[in-house]
Amino acid sequence: MDQALFLKIFAALFAIMSPIANLPVFLSLTADKGPGFERKVAFTLLISLSIGAVFIGLTGDVVLKIFGISLDAFRLAGGFLILLIALDLIRGQKTEAHHGHASEQDNMQSQDNPAIYPLTVPILLGPGSISTMIIFRGQVTGVEQEIAYVAGVAAAIAVLIGTFFAAPFLSRFIGETANSVMSRLMGMILAAIAMEMMTGSLKVLMPGLA
């Protein structure tokens, strides 16, 4: 298995999906409905995220071909989008691309079962995470990298769902300070990954810069 690719995919998705930062969102959307409802939502999330990840992995490059978009052009645009998400994390802000604007957030709170909307889409499986999966999937060559890609995506989803299953326990210990520190640390890692995506694509699209 390509360990470097595995770590890049896992770190990028972990930073974007941000289990610790999204834990309060999960708790607020399942508040006053009991631990059984929380487990039901977390299990539904596991299924929906897994299906979404498989669909993106199988169709991402096909979509690019249909629209005549090269992987490097998409990698540049995706890297820029991921950089914007990273800057929001560093500033301690929630990006509208994943969390929606004010009126959308009000609608999110009114959902009977928030597992599909808004938790899966757009909060966890939004533009940033979709772009990340398509970009890394397009770079995969060989069996070792295929395994690394699948393992990286699976590990990120597993950590996320594990965090939500343990929400009642973790909420006692994870305060605002820990959340703030984690958000900024993940933002820095995500910014570095985004810059690597953008510079790599620019070297291909504009060879004179290399």
Image (cartoon, helix red, strand yellow):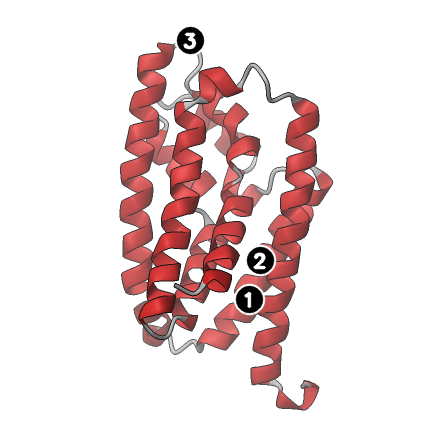
Q: Which residue position holds label 3?
A: 32
The answer to whether marks 2 and 1 mark residues whose Cβ atoms lie closer than 8 Å is yes
Disc with the residue nearer the chain's start (2 vs 3): 3
Q: Position of residue 62 (x, y in %)?
A: 30, 70
Q: Considering the image in quadrants, where does the C terminus appear?
A: bottom right
In which quarter of the view is residue 111 placed?
top left
How much space separates mark 2 and mark 3, taking CA atoms?
Answer: 35 Å
Amino acid type at circle 2 is Leu
Q: Which residue position holds label 1?
A: 77
Which residue is drawn at the image coordinates 40% and 31% (left, top)?
A: 162
Mark 1 lies on a secondary structure that is: helix
In which quarter of the view is residue 118 placed?
top left
Q: Position of residue 125 (x, y in %)?
A: 41, 45
Q: Which residue position holds label 2?
A: 81
Amino acid type at circle 3 is Asp
Amino acid type at circle 1 is Ala
The 10 Å Cα crowd at callout 3, few under 14, some 14 to 19, many 20 or more, is few
Left or right, 202 with respect to 177, comes to left
Disc with the residue nearer the chain's start (3 vs 1): 3
Q: Position of residue 158 (x, y in %)?
A: 38, 39
The answer to whether marks 3 and 1 mark residues whose Cβ atoms lie closer than 8 Å is no
Camera-side residue: 67 or 92?
92
Say above or below: 36 vs 63: above
Which residue is drawn at the image coordinates 38% and 67% (left, top)?
A: 145
How much space separates mark 2 and mark 1, taking CA atoms?
Answer: 6 Å
Q: Position of residue 153 (x, y in %)?
A: 39, 51
Camera-side residue: 187 or 147?
147
Mark 3 lies on a secondary structure that is: loop
